[in-house]
Amino acid sequence: MTIPTILVVGIKRSFGCVLRTILPPQQFDVIETRTGEEALDFVRNTRPDLIILDISLRGANGLEVCQKIHLSCSTPIIVFSERNSGRGKFLALDLGADDRFLSVFGLKELQALICTHLRSGPFNGEMPVFTNAELTVDFERRHVTVRGRRIYLTPKQFDLLRYLIANKGRPVTHQNLFEVGWGLDSREHAENLRVVINQLRKKIEADPASPQYILTEPGVGYRFQSPPEHKGENACA
């Protein structure tokens, strides 16, 4: 059985030691690179299962490295920040990161975050294709096509979209989406959830400001539906 590989990019070496302490070595392989260039080379040659990236990389723009990794593969990316830099962390999410954490995170929280991103997703087994006149989602291949054009989603974006489609027509609570996306029962992810939903709307909606697929349920969460004019869609869940 192949054990998951975690690539740590640009974070001080003591962090790798911490990871090896909280993650059993027989279950995880932790690889460290010091620069963004080394990380990109590693990703090109050996696809890791998870990437933890310091957005304040020395000698490189961490946000740019984050975007390049996201465009080259679907590996989940967690960005690390020494400070609670609001603009930087949310810009990183816009550029392809799946989550973020601060240096003040507790070890149990960090361990839970890593395990959440390494799990296969909120569903077991294969799901068929959802399709209508404008949107096609192939759950097995993780392919999304909008108006005939292939688009790319981060693993977190895809998992949230898949969960919403699986519950098509029914309101899905914020808490359920927190658990799908982050595996944590915590309101601190409320802003992260809004960011990911906005990202999804920008990618699949014709007019993100007036969404037809992902609707807001005030005080509850979100609901996925097909636009009324596309009643002939075929969706299996």
Image: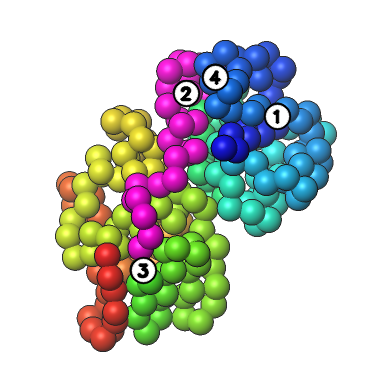
Q: Residue at x 27, y 65 (%)?
A: 237
Residue under circle 4?
Answer: 24
Give the mark nearer the N terminus: 2 vs 1: 1
Secondary structure type for disc 2? helix
Q: CA distance from mark 2 to mark 3?
A: 32 Å
Rendered view: 4 above or below 25:
below
Q: Residue at x 48, y 68 (%)?
A: 144
x and y, in percent, of residue 51 in the image: 62, 37
Q: Is residue 224 visible?
A: no
Q: Amino acid at mark 3?
A: Pro
Q: Amino acid at mark 1?
A: Ile
Residue under circle 3?
Answer: 128
Q: How is the image coloured?
A: rainbow
x and y, in percent, of residue 177 in the image: 30, 45
Q: Which residues are magenta?
A: 102-127
Residue 111's tag is 2
Q: Residue at x 63, y 35 (%)?
A: 5
